[in-house]
Image (tube, rainbow, N blue to C red):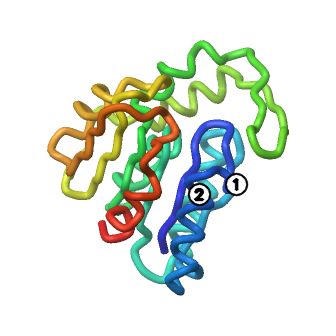
């Protein structure tokens, strides 16, 4: 199973999720692709992802974007899985601290929720000081990411296979051209 994990306030309808689903389907691999819509609470999201991993017929392979990269790292470490990380959030509890008390809106379905100190504490509980096996990770970052500093990800995933690309933005503009490498990894 190839499990795509979307980012903060996103969904299975994100551009990258749809591109990957279409690519897999065009090659007869659609049944091996899963991208759930995750609940906004981090522990509920992890619980849903872990249920999918447990139900997988073979070792799940993870692809995570932004906050999804943070979740993918936690799951890869916990379950010994491989993960592709696309402009991942490192130390998300620090990055999202300013969102506490603010109403968040899902970009795709318009649903809203209040981001609380409990959400932040849950993110903090999932944060890992380091990865244990860099060989299990493929990092894809664009230096033009306006949301997250690519250097932080490059340092955190030191020793992992890395593609650090000039330009781009937080959406990872070259995603379609990297799908074959993502699936091969």
Residue identifier under label 1: 13
Q: Residue furthest left?
A: 159
Question: What distance separates the C-alpha of mark 1 from that of mark 2?
Answer: 6 Å
Residue depicted at 80% across the width and 31% down the height: 113
> The C terminus lies in which quarter of the figure?
bottom left
Tag 2: Cα neighbours inside 10 Å, few (<14), some, or many (≥20)?
A: many
Helix, strand or loop at mark 2: helix
Location of residue 135 by image quarter? bottom left
**Residue 174 versus residue 125 in the image, above or below:** below
Is the residue under label 2 in contact with that under label 1 (CB below 8 Å)?
A: yes
Across and down, in percent, residue 30 comes to: 58, 79
Helix, strand or loop at mark 1: loop
Q: Nearer the viewer, residue 173 or 149?
A: 173
Across and down, in percent, residue 174 comes to: 42, 48
Residue identifier under label 2: 17
Across and down, in percent, residue 81 comes to: 35, 63
Location of residue 149 by image quarter? top left
Residue depicted at 52% across the width and 39% down the height: 171
| Left/right of residue 131 with respect to residue 91 in the rendered view | left
Residue depicted at 44% across the width and 26% down the height: 148
Across and down, in percent, residue 20 comes to: 53, 64
């Amino acid at each position: 199973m190839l499990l795509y994990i979307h980012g903060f306030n996103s969904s299975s309808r994100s551009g990258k999720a749809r591109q990957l689903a279409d690519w897999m389907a065009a090659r007869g691999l659609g049944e091996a692709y899963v991208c759930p819509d995750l609940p906004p609470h981090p522990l509920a999201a992890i619980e849903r992802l872990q249920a999918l991993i447990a139900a997988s017929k073979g070792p799940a392979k993870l692809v995570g974007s932004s906050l999804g990269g943070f979740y993918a790292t936690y799951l890869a470490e916990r379950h010994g899985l491989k993960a592709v990380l696309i402009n991942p959030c490192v130390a998300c509890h620090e990055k999202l601290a300013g969102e506490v008390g603010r109403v968040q809106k899902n970009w795709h379905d318009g649903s809203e929720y209040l981001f609380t100190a409990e959400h932040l504490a849950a993110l903090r509980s999932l944060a890992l000081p380091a990865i244990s096996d860099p060989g299990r990770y493929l990092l894809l970052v664009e230096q033009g990411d306006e949301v997250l500093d690519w250097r932080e990800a490059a340092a955190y995933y030191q020793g992992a296979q890395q593609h650090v690309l000039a330009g781009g933005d937080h959406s990872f503009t070259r995603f379609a051209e990297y799908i074959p490498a993502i699936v091969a990894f």
